[in-house]
Image (cartoon, helix red, strand yellow):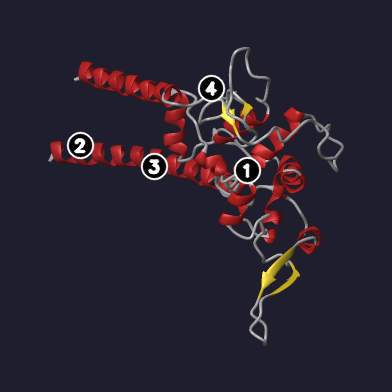
């Protein structure tokens, strides 16, 4: 029996490793994303609110010119440490379409905290037309959509915590991975070389960050690496804002199940002991 279980476990490990390798062999990036330490990683991870606020600043001042974040409302920003007054001030910088009014016409007004953060384009068709036929992806769920495996141990851990936190690894690697194409490497016109790009090495999006693209309010130096890490963390929060709370609840559930299992076992022993003595 033990040998059979060992064989099954061995086959499962081999299958998972094979799947992990195949995801990079079948048209994916040539190299795996960098493994970055995140404050929200692990069963006891927490959000770094300062980092999330810096990440929002990078999104707002750099990324928002092309990418939307349609599922996040201004009031959600209070969850990353902004005060109510700050959220109102941020919302007031935007205009949203509302209506119809009494005359049946749509109109523009200043945004309020309950509004969703408006994107740079009116619709997907306009976004595609402005960007050579390819609409820039929305940032709301991109960190989850770009989740990648780090290997078997992380895969098992993710099974228990019910989330994938590796999407930011990919986003960070992509943002910091722009470089000159190797000698003899030809790229399609209008594309850029990035070995981390999941669809290959030629990416239409030009390098978005160069360092000092923003001025952080907390005095943090705005290097390419720092900005990339901050906006990647912000995108993870946008994709899974209740990640930390859900992990904490999951940990409590596991502890409860362990204690409950022990109590059931002790109850079983007590019952059978009484039956044997009867």
Mark earlier in primary sequence (2, 1): 1
Mark earlier in primary sequence (2, 3): 3
Q: In whole angstroms, how far apart are the C-alphas of marks 3 and 4?
A: 36 Å
* Residue 278 versus residue 221 in the image, above or below: below
Asked whether the viewer can see residue 262, the reply is yes
Residue 45 appears in which quarter of the rendering?
Answer: top right
Task: Tell me the element at label 3.
Answer: helix
**Along the line of sight, the residue nearer the viewer: 59 or 210:** 210
In contact (CB < 8 Å): disc 4 and disc 2: no
Residue highlighted by disc 4: 32
The total number of labels drawn is 4
**Along the line of sight, the residue nearer the viewer: 182 or 57:** 182
Query: Residue drawn at (67%, 25%), measured in percent from left and top?
Result: 178
Residue highlighted by disc 3: 257
Left or right: 274 in relation to 6: left
Q: In whole angstroms, how far apart are the C-alphas of marks 1 and 4?
A: 20 Å
Q: Which mark is residue 46?
A: none
Left or right: 247 in relation to 82: left
Q: In whole angstroms, how far apart are the C-alphas of marks 2 and 1?
A: 56 Å
**Along the line of sight, the residue nearer the viewer: 66 or 54:** 66
Q: Which mark is residue 273?
A: 2
* Residue 19 versus residue 143 in the image, above or below: above
Mark earlier in primary sequence (4, 2): 4
* Residue 101 versus residue 128 in the image, above or below: below
Mark earlier in primary sequence (1, 4): 4
Q: Residue furthest bottom?
A: 102
């Amino acid at each position: 029996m033990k040998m059979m279980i060992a064989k099954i476990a061995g086959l499962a490990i081999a299958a998972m490793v094979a799947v992990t390798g195949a995801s990079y062999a079948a048209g994916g990036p040539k190299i795996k994303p960098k493994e970055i330490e995140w404050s929200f990683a692990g069963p006891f991870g927490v959000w770094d609110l300062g980092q999330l606020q810096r990440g929002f600043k990078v999104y707002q001042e750099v990324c928002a010119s092309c990418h939307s974040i349609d599922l996040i409302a201004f009031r959600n920003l209070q969850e990353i440490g902004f005060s109510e007054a700050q959220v109102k001030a941020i919302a007031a910088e935007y205009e949203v379409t509302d209506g119809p009014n009494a005359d049946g016409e749509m109109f523009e007004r200043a945004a309020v905290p309950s509004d969703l953060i408006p994107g740079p384009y009116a619709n997907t068709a306009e976004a595609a037309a402005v960007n050579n036929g390819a609409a820039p992806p929305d940032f709301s769920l991109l960190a989850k959509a770009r989740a990648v495996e780090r290997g078997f141990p992380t895969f098992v851990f993710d099974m228990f915590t019910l989330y994938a936190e590796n999407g930011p690894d990919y986003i960070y690697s992509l943002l910091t991975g722009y470089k000159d194409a190797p000698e003899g490497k030809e790229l399609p016109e209008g594309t850029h070389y990035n070995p981390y790009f999941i669809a290959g090495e030629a990416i239409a999006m030009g390098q978005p960050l160069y360092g000092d693209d923003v001025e952080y309010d907390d005095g943090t130096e705005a290097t390419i690496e720092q900005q990339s890490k901050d906006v990647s963390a912000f995108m993870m929060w946008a994709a899974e804002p209740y990640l930390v709370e859900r992990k904490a609840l999951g940990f409590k559930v596991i502890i409860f199940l362990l204690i409950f299992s022990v109590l059931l076992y002790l109850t079983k022993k007590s019952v059978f002991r009484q039956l044997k003595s009867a």
